[in-house]
Image (cartoon, coloured by chain):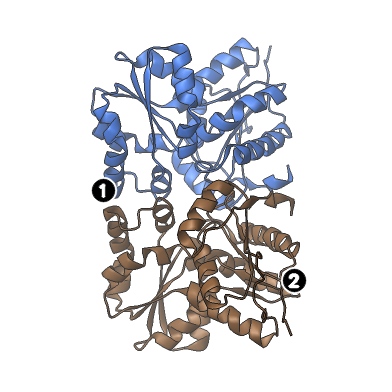
Chain colours: A brown, B blue
Amino acid sequence: MAGDERPIGMFDSGVGGLTVAREVMRNIPNERIVYFGDTARVPYGGKSKETILRYSRQIVHFLRTQNVKAIVVACNTASAFALEEIRRELDIPIIGVVKPGARVACLTTKNNRIGVIGTRGTIASGLYTEFIREIRPAAQVIGKACPLFVPLVEEGMLKDPVTVEMAERYLKELKEQEIDTLILGCTHYPLLRSVIGQIMGEKVTLVNPAYETALGLKELLEREGLMNVRGLEEGVSHRFFVSDAAENFREIANHMLPMDISGACRINIEEY
Amino acid sequence: MAGDERPIGMFDSGVGGLTVAREVMRNIPNERIVYFGDTARVPYGGKSKETILRYSRQIVHFLRTQNVKAIVVACNTASAFALEEIRRELDIPIIGVVKPGARVACLTTKNNRIGVIGTRGTIASGLYTEFIREIRPAAQVIGKACPLFVPLVEEGMLKDPVTVEMAERYLKELKEQEIDTLILGCTHYPLLRSVIGQIMGEKVTLVNPAYETALGLKELLEREGLMNVRGLEEGVSHRFFVSDAAENFREIANHMLPMDISGACRINIEEY
């Protein structure tokens, strides 16, 4: 039996979700990915639930045209604002990055004090807190929005003194609250892992939802009998679509992914 | 004769263009403004010409439904990428912020060394350089993209040490090049005027295209016989439309404008 050879659909507001794509490629190498980055409307972090839901619906509509067997919402803001409603409208499985990250944080903490950093939208949604409390009702969750982290990452200032200064400000309260587990609740943030780790110190475990999402996807595919047992055929490769500036995307993707991509295709997402 | 009582249409990627609206209200108080801020797709600065042109066309189409007599592109990126093409498609006058800023810089400089700061899109377009050279062929134009200024302004970090540090880095080269005139080529930047002025020193004149655009609009309306001679009637006021998060917009607008606005109306710009 060859299993299900249809691809996995995945989307993010831009390049951040490639950290999730990378983990899927490493952990479920048999699966083909169709990735969409909404580079014409990036960032999602400060925008309203209504707008993020409309954008997510358009993207899911587009991904369905690519005959995907499951969808990964590789964006924390869209996972927080749109996932539950879209799940009700879909007949294929869909998973986001919030629940897998929350689950692992609950398994990791020893003192029941969990920090979450993310965009304004993700933190204001309170969704990490909600999921964590469901699994571990005794946990205290301290959320902190870090709105400058995305532009700093997109400027490539990964270890810059300005980034360190902003990280010290954003993380000060979380340190004072003596958390022992910190969820990197935005797909850009794993790229700041070394700065964040240095400030938080060795006693705080950093949780990367990208990795946990890849494992969650694997479980889901197995459970639903959707794994591609045969593996990728020669010449069959992942595909990348964006809503703007395909060439920029390709360059960044080639830095972030374990292999070079041949290109990204620009589409007009507003038509979906 | 009452002149032409139809409103002026004005648009920007978000709140930045309110610096232009403010100057129009101060300098042509008889005119009513219909303002559109594209808060669902903000920022424009790093996006492609093709995308900015598509967005601008949709917005112009919306503004036409409001029976405007002229359009002000209150956004440097859209002025650089979309103004000339849209002008060819329109039967009402349209002006942007680039040309008025360039003209005043040419009248101001004594040593023919003019600096321009803006988003990546504005600087990469080379449009300020082109306009300046047309008027003053001997001028040397030194452009510098300052991509973190918009997020720093939107975080309200107008005089923060981090903003000062970034400004020092961005402006270092312009200081070394001994410019005597600096165009604030992004509508957010006048809010950083005091930091930028302190770093550049007294010998450098800062040009604010928002103010020059208001004067340019006044001349245009007079020349075309479009002035509202009678003035605003009691109860007639400016109107504000956005593509996302109307309440946030209202709060920021009330800080930036000389009067409080009663509200902004959210529309789905993708339908235009």
The residue to which callout 1 is attached is: B161
Q: Secondary structure at mark 1?
A: helix
Q: Position of residue B229 (x, y in %)?
A: 62, 16
Which chain does tag 1 point to?
A: B
As measured in the structure, the alpha-carbon distance from the residue carrying label 1 to the one carrying label 2 is 48 Å
Does residue A4 appear anywhere in the picture? yes
Q: Please say if B89 is above or below A171.
A: above
Which quarter of the image is occupied by the C terminus of chain B? top right
The structure residue drawn at horizontal position 47% and vertical position 61%, both measured from the top left corner, is A256
Q: Nearer the viewer, residue A44 or B81?
A: B81
The residue to which callout 2 is attached is: A89
Q: Quadrant of residue B137?
A: top left
Q: Quadrant of residue B189?
A: top left
Which chain does tag 2 point to?
A: A
Q: Position of residue B218 (x, y in %)?
A: 55, 17
Compared across the picture, whether B101 is left or right of B192 comes to right
Q: Please say if B86 is above or below A223.
A: above
